[in-house]
Image: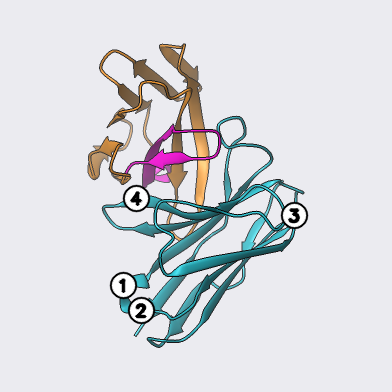
């Protein structure tokens, strides 16, 4: 079965810190995604990648960047964390475009920025 | 998910049927999905329906699609305590992007 692993379940960081969220998938999926989940707002797409070293902005990319140096790993970077980035972050992957293949999600990282 | 709307909460008695409703806006969406999120976990695909279908049944789950009204519903028959979760409706916007609703928290009471 596909496994999407996020490196941390909970993270607490201070305002202004640089934060790295790591995600690894073990099924050779082409596509990887970062979403943030906020109560009452659902999931919003931050960035996605359809190939190594390729990235595309989602709906809310401001304040974030991503890195995909290897196919199995997709990192989300908060260059200078702010309190409004406190949220649940979900990583997902799919074999092909999500409209043809289902998304597999990690368990999420709850980030608190103080 | 500003384009996908669903009610935020649903409380249902164990053994009854649950119906979760969703409205979407993009009439060109090819697939519509229902994802389930259990406490402390990521989302898992529950079921999906292709836009040229009106209904899809899978064991206790029935999905109804009304394209004219852009309305999608998920019915869970004989609701069990294990069905307590957040249910997300999602529509396809393009090859890579899904638009998710805010999620409906279903609470099953004894």
Counting from the top left corner in percent of width and height, residue A29 is at 71, 46
Question: Residue drawn 33% across and 24% down?
Answer: B72
Looking at the image, is mark 4 or mark 2 nearer the viewer?
Answer: 2
Disc 1 from disc 4: Cα separation? 16 Å
Q: Is residue B99 above or below residue A39?
A: above
Counting from the top left corner in percent of width and height, residue B33 is at 46, 32
Residue occupied by mark 1: A84
Residue occupied by mark 2: A82
Asked if labels 2 and 4 touch by Cβ distance under 8 angstroms, the answer is no
Which segment is the magenta one? Answer: B81-101
Counting from the top left corner in percent of width and height, residue B13 is at 26, 37
Q: Is residue A111 left or right of residue B10?
A: right
Q: Colour of chain B?
A: orange
Tell me which chain the residue with mark 4 is part of. A
Q: Is residue A95 magenta?
A: no
Q: Colour of chain A?
A: cyan
Disc 2 from disc 3: Cα separation? 31 Å
Looking at the image, is mark 1 or mark 4 nearer the viewer?
Answer: 1
Disc 3 from disc 1: Cα separation? 31 Å
Give the mark, 1 or 4, whose residue is nearer the N terminus: 4
- The quarter holding residue A37 reads bottom left
| Crowd tier of the residue under label 2, counting other residues whose Cα lies within 10 Å: few below 14, some 14–19, many 20 or above | some
Residue occupied by mark 3: A26
Give the mark, 3 or 4, whose residue is nearer the N terminus: 3
Counting from the top left corner in percent of width and height, residue B87 is at 38, 41
- The quarter holding residue B82 reads top left
Labels 3, 4: one chain: yes
Asked if labels 1 and 2 touch by Cβ distance under 8 angstroms, the answer is yes
Question: Residue drawn 36% across and 34% down?
Answer: B79
Disc 2 from disc 1: Cα separation? 5 Å
Name the disc covering residue A42, or none. Answer: 4
Asked if labels 3 and 2 touch by Cβ distance under 8 angstroms, the answer is no
């Amino acid at each position: 079965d596909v496994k999407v692993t996020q490196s941390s379940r909970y993270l607490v960081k201070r305002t202004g810190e640089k934060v790295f969220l790591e995600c690894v998938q073990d099924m050779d999926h082409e596509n990887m995604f970062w979403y943030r989940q906020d109560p009452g707002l659902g999931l919003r797409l931050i960035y996605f990648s359809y190939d190594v070293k390729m990235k595309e902005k989602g709906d809310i990319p401001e304040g974030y960047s991503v890195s995909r140096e290897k196919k199995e790993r997709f990192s989300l970077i908060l260059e200078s964390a702010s309190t409004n980035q406190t949220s649940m972050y979900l990583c997902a992957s799919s074999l092909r475009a999500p409209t043809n293949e289902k998304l597999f999600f990690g368990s999420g990282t709850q980030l608190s920025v103080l | 998910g500003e384009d996908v709307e669903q009610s935020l909460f649903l409380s249902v008695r164990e053994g009854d049927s649950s119906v979760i409703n969703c409205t979407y806006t993009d009439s060109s969406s090819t697939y519509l999905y229902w994802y389930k999120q259990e406490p402390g976990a990521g989302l898992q695909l529950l079921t999906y329906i292709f836009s040229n279908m009106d209904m899809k049944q899978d064991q206790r789950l029935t999905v109804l699609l009304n394209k004219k009204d852009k309305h999608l519903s998920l019915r869970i028959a004989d609701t069990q305590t294990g069905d307590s979760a957040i249910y997300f409706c999602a529509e396809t916007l393009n090859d890579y992007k899904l638009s998710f609703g805010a999620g409906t928290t279903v609470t099953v009471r004894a």
